[in-house]
Image: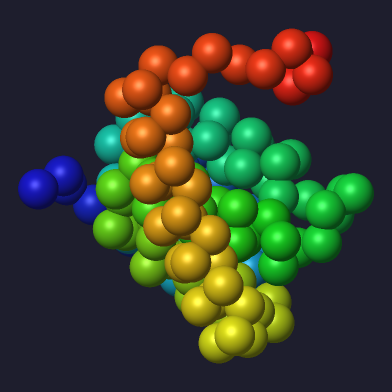
Amino acid sequence: MTRLVEYADAPPEVRAVYDAIKAARGVPDVNNFWKALAVHPPTLARTWESLSAVMAPGALDPVVKEMLYVAVSIAHGCDYCIASHTAAARAKGMTEAQHGELLAVVGMASETNRLAQALRVKVDPQFEG
């Protein structure tokens, strides 16, 4: 298991990122993902900057962004990411009905993706570009 860097043990550059995360999320402490990344401060800082930019307000609704994150996390088999982003999606307003439909779509997409790959289906010209 990866070592977790607690705030009290963190160097100043890690504490600065932790402070930014806590302020942005209104939480008293950062979660274990960030504490694990802190073993390499440049990766911690880069990941927080990138995540902040991608998940910032934009053309997609915040709950949709979290639901997309859940879908990709399921596809990649990341239990931690599934749990954390499902919680975030719920906090941003995802309903149980939306969660159920999300899981149905992810399951169906996984099945049809595997079938298309296994059958080596040629992409139709109208779907190109």
Give the quadrant of residue 123.
top right
Residue 29 placed where, x, y %? 45, 70
Which residue is at 34% across, 30% downward?
A: 40
Is residue 42 or residue 122 the one in the foreground? 122
Residue 15 placed where, x, y %? 48, 50
Residue 19 can be seen, yes or no: no
Q: Is residue 10 toward the left or the right of residue 1 in the image? A: right
Q: Is residue 1 toward the left or the right of residue 123 in the image? A: left
- 58 relative to 126, above or below: below
Which residue is at 74% across, 21% downward?
A: 127
Which residue is at 59% across, 85% downward?
A: 97
Residue reaching furthest to the right: 59
Residue 79 can be seen, yes or no: yes
- 95 relative to 44, above or below: below
Residue 9 placed where, x, y %? 29, 53
- 71 relative to 39, above or below: below
- Quarter in which the C terminus is drawn: top right
Which residue is at 47% across, 19% downward?
A: 121
Residue reaching furthest to the left: 1
Q: Is residue 20 toward the left or the right of residue 69 in the image? A: right
